[in-house]
Amino acid sequence: MKKYFSLAFLLAGIATYNAQDVSDALQYSLTNVNGTARFRGMSGAFGAVGGDLSAISINPASSSVFNNNQISGSLNYFGLTNKSNYFGSSRTETANDFNINQLGGVFVFKNNNSDEWTKFAFAINYNNLNNFENRSFSAGINPNSSVVDYFVESANGIRLEYLDDLSLSIYDFDYFGQHALMAYSTYLINPVTTDAGNIDYTSNAIGTGNFYQEKDIISTGYNGKLTFNASALYQDKLYIGLNLNSHFSNYLKSYSIYEDYADATNSDNTAGVQALRFDNDLETNGTGFSFQLGAIFKITEEFRIGGTYESPTWIRLTDIKSHYLTTDCADCPDPGYEFGTDTSIEYLPYTLRTPEKLTGSAAFVFGKEGLISIDYSYKNYKNTTYISDESYFDGLNNDLKDQLKKVNELRIGAEKKYKQWSFRAGYHTETSPYKDENKMGDLTGYSGGIGYNFGGTKLDFAYTSYKRKYGEQFLPYGMTSASQINSKNNNITATLTFEL
């Protein structure tokens, strides 16, 4: 008769050992073109244009372009489609979300007593930098490697006497050591010898190839930025500004990996592990700070240029994780004791420093007829750094430098006005932050929008679409097979603006 064994290391308290990877760092470094409908309709190409609350997030000098006080709020529909391919097997998953994408106001003060500093502006604005809503599912027959290979690699190097010692706390093991203990206790792996000093392990799963595997991922959350802005206009030509940004993030991710050996090569349904399920849950919360300095210069009434320096973001993060392993074993002995309780592990906080960003912009403004704008941004993701006293992060920072590279981003936007109507279009492209573009490809996006000015009130709509390919690796090492995912995002944004 088959026996099912489960082990959950979900103990309450604070753990000192964590396990981040390169993709976790990018989670808080990458941003999308989010904001007002006008901003999104032109693909965010506003660095030399200004006059929009979300443009302040690109160039803090933008607030002095306003002629009147304004407040605006934006509602966004987010739709995602992920098409995965894993060893020739294709699956499609979708996710969607409604959220308040932007909310803020700007207050303009004209100085009639000076010919030098003729205008001052102050603004406060919230922008949702990134929506973490995601869902993907990959399944297929892997002819080469098993999920168990990961647990074998996690265990190799750990003395058997430690895995057998029930007096040891889970906190005596690092993150991967916890997985080794889970695998050993659920009979997923076996020691090569029974000596106390044994440090080598083998798989107890049946089969030598053609492993059926699934990975199901669900995530939600946001990465938001609250901006406090001040700017000024000098001699009606030079706009300068400063942003002080408060960042806050909440990220929830669950993934489940399943593997069975019913159709595996050399399968045997009378002995060994027949199937496994490995579940992981993560909650990350963080707060951070960054600043921006920017300027816009009117070379002529029609042509203007802009430049922005955006500092690194220093964000303090705390992880709460749980992981659960279940095995289906045909001939394993009854272990004779209960396995764990249903609580979670909170890890010590750490700091992530994202790379700084430089943006150059140019725009042609055709009076009240419309405009054409272009923004170019540069960001070196090799400078992404974890800051912590834990030695584990030293190796991870080396991985960041080895795997990541410089990124170029281009945004082009145009607006045409006809009476009270405005028509907009845009294009956005961003190169991959990875040296190996199989891990993440280039981003390409398009946008369009329409708006109507009622006088003191404006109503704008925008549609944006962007796509990117990336590889979803099942596990960090040992079993490193990845599914290839084509991801496409579609967004509809509505913004209501009031002049005060």
Image (spheres, helix red, strand yellow):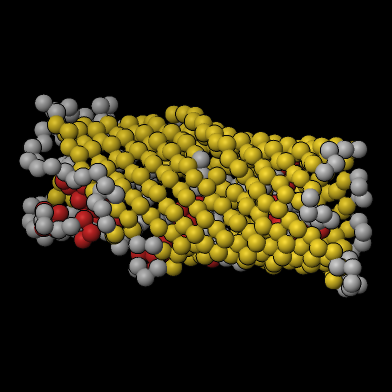
Give how far across and how far down residue 419 sits, in percent. 91, 38
**Quarter residue 445 falls in:** top right
Depicted 274 relative to depicted 33: above or below: above
| Number of residue marks | 0
Residue 10 vs residue 459, the one in the foreground:
459
In the displayed structure image, the side of residue 151 where residue 90 appears, left or right: right
Side of 175 relative to 420 (left or right): left
Residue in the foreground of this view, choosing between 76 and 385 = 76
The residue depicted at 89 percent of the width and 73 percent of the height is 114
- Residue 388 appears in the figure: yes
* Residue shown at the point (87%, 38%) measured from the top left: 420
Across and down, in percent, residue 2 comes to 14, 28
**Position of 197 relative to 441 (above/below):** below
In the image, residue 430 sits, relative to residue 326, either above or below, namely below
Q: Is residue 358 visible?
A: no
Q: Is residue 165 left or right of residue 96?
A: left
